[in-house]
Structures are given as structure tokens and as C-alpha cells.
């Protein structure tokens, strides 16, 4: 166990040294050492409590002191018929070996398994992975998005549902990871992700937060948040809510292009990224509180 933790430390330090600034590297080390502490998997504890006690309140804290409590844990456990419409439409683009990033309890994995796909689910929450395996996910691994590497290759489809485009964290890290993903799919890859345009919120605290981000050179929808559950506080993480135009800007020059965008409700949308030598125009489908957008 000690050696695996040291390996994790090395990989995380290496990943963040490549991807981010020295400050982000130090933050990564803080997150890792927090992870070494017992009983800090607030997200996993919440999911387990939902299964055992029907707990449905998710509490998200933002680094400006804003705390939001909302219902919606049930969505992590939904079957295909209860998914958001943009997710139902977008998953049709999946092919080959699918990697479900931020799989939670495995709703996407289970659907794809039933459809005959080879699928791997990853999540950095041990509790979530435990529930995913218990629920029937055949290949569920406790691993963060920055730990995706050649051991999972080849990957044909990367899925980031529940607004998990946000797991890219920052614009700079998103570009680095997109290039990394390109190298894992042997020239045949697709990314299916959902995001949310947070500019629709006119709450005073949200407007001020977006203004502060712009002043600091960040995208308006970048947030630093953590999950809380009863007496457990999860680690802080950067989460990136990108608008459609921002997604297009982020992927430019990474070897991917936006091929389709599928509109959802309340600022949510699904985006299909495909590999291309020459950027192609995006095709937009015309179907149509910060923390509620963290649902997967």
C-alpha cells in the first residue's frame, strides 16, 4: 500500500509539473496528502448513503465561501431512459473501447456493457468505484483523469458525462490532456462530453466569481470546489464549466475539433469531439446556483 501511494505521488507530481504552474503543482501535492488522510472520500460516502439510506442532498462548497445544497444524487444511479436528453443522443457516437471518466457508480458503463461495448470506468473516489463494481461494472478502476495513460490504451471513445468536461480543471490542463488522449486512440477517437454555460446565473455571488476569474486570467466558469458530506470534507479540485465557444477555443490546436453540439436545458449541452487533420465546422443541434451543474 505504501509503495502504491508513493507511485501515486510520483505520477501526480509528474502530471501537474507538465500541465500546470508551480502553484497548481503545490495544490496537487496538497490534494494528494489530503487523500492520504482517512475518511475524506465525501463523494463516495454520499453515494453509499444514497444506496443505503436514500440520501439525496449533495453539498458543494466553493472557495469563495459559497455553499450549495441541492437534490440530485439519484441521477448518478439512473438508467438510460432517465438520462438527460443530450446524453441519450450523444452516447450514440460511442465506438470501440470506451473509457468512462468520472464514472461514479457506473450508470454509463452498465448501459454500454449491455449494448456490447468494451468499457472501462475510472473515478478518483474509492467509494464510487466500490459501488460500481458491486453494481456490475466489469472493469472499474480508482484513478484520476491525470492518471490516464498507455495502460488503458487503445481507447476509441472518451466519455465525460454529468458536466465532466469540467474534470479538465483548467484551460491549460485541458489542452495537455486532449493531446494526451489523442496519443491513446491510434488515430481513431471520439470524445463525448457534457458541459454547462454558467453565465446564465445572475446570482450576485456567481457574477462576482466570474468577474474575479476574468481579472485573474481564468475562464469565467473555472471553479475550485469540494464535496462535503456530514462530517467529511473532500479534497479541493479545479472544475471547468466551459461554454460552447470556450470549448471550441480550448480544443483548437490539440488535434481535436468540435463536430457536433447537442443542446440541453438550463445552459447544459453535449459536445462531440473528433480527431481531424483539418478543423471542421461545428454542427449545432437546436433541441433544446453553480453546484447543481456538478451532477454526472
Image: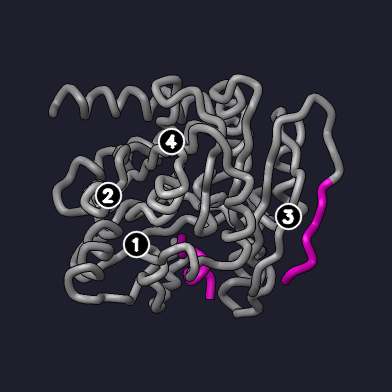
Tag 4's secondary structure?
strand
Identify residue for label 4: 118
Name the residue rendered at 42%, 38% in the picture.
Answer: 119
Query: What is the x, y in percent for residue 94?
Result: 58, 43
SS at mark 2? loop
Going from N to C along the chain, the mark reached first, 3 or 2, is: 2
Relative image position of residue 78 (x, y in whole percent): 40, 66
Write down the residue under mark 3.
261
Q: Is disc 4 in contact with disc 3, using a CB cutoff of under 8 Å? A: no
**Which comes sooner in the sequence, label 4 or label 1?**
4
Q: CA distance from mark 4 to mark 1?
A: 31 Å
The residue depicted at 20 percent of the width and 26 percent of the height is 4
* Quadrant hosting residue 188: top right
C-alpha distance separating marks 3 and 2: 31 Å
- Judged from the image, the secondary structure of the residue bearing numbered disc 1 is strand
Pick the quarter of the image with the N terminus.
Answer: top left
Q: Which of the two marks, 3 or 2, is nearer to us in this view?
A: 2
Horizontal side, residue 51 vs residue 152: left or right:
left
Q: Which residue is tagged 1?
A: 227
Q: CA distance from mark 1 to mark 3?
A: 29 Å
Q: Is residue 45 left or right of residue 248?
A: left
Q: Earlier in the sequence, mark 1 or mark 3?
A: 1
From the image, state whether disc 4 or disc 1 is nearer to you.
4
Q: Rounded to the nearest whole Å, what is the CA distance between mark 4 and mark 3?
A: 25 Å
Residue 128 part of the magenta segment:
no
Q: Which residues are magenta?
A: 282-296
Amino acid at each position: 500500500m505504501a509503495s502504491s501511494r508513493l507511485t501515486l505521488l510520483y505520477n501526480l507530481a509528474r502530471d501537474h509539473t507538465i500541465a500546470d504552474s508551480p502553484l497548481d503543482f503545490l495544490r496537487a501535492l496538497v490534494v494528494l496528502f489530503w487523500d492520504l488522510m482517512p475518511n475524506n472520500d465525501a463523494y463516495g460516502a454520499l453515494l453509499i448513503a444514497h444506496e443505503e439510506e436514500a440520501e439525496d442532498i449533495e453539498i458543494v462548497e466553493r472557495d469563495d465561501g459559497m455553499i450549495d445544497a441541492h437534490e440530485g444524487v439519484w441521477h448518478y444511479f439512473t438508467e438510460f431512459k432517465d438520462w438527460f436528453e443530450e446524453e441519450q443522443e450523444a452516447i450514440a457516437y460511442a465506438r470501440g473501447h470506451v473509457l468512462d471518466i468520472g464514472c461514479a457508480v457506473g450508470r454509463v458503463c452498465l448501459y454500454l456493457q449491455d449494448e456490447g461495448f468494451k468499457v472501462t470506468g475510472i473515478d478518483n473516489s474509492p467509494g464510487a468505484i466500490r459501488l460500481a463494481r458491486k453494481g456490475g461494472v466489469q472493469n472499474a478502476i480508482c484513478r484520476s483523469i491525470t492518471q490516464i495513460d498507455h495502460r488503458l490504451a487503445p481507447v476509441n471513445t472518451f466519455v465525460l458525462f454529468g458536466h465532466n468536461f469540467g474534470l479538465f480543471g483548467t484551460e491549460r490542463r485541458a489542452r495537455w490532456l486532449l493531446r494526451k488522449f489523442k496519443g491513446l486512440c491510434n488515430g481513431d477517437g471520439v470524445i463525448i462530453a457534457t458541459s454547462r454555460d454558467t453565465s446564465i446565473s445572475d446570482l450576485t455571488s456567481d457574477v462576482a466569481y466570474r468577474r474575479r476569474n476574468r481579472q485573474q486570467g481564468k475562464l469565467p466558469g473555472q471553479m475550485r470546489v469540494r464535496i462535503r458530506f456530514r462530517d467529511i470534507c473532500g479534497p479541493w479540485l479545479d472544475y471547468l464549466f466551459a461554454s460552447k465557444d470556450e470549448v471550441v477555443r480550448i480544443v483548437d490546436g490539440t488535434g481535436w475539433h468540435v463536430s457536433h453540439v447537442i443542446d440541453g436545458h438550463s445552459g447544459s449541452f453535449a459536445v462531440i469531439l473528433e480527431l481531424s487533420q483539418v478543423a471542421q465546422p461545428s454542427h449545432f443541434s437546436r433541441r433544446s446556483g453553480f453546484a447543481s451543474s456538478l451532477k454526472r
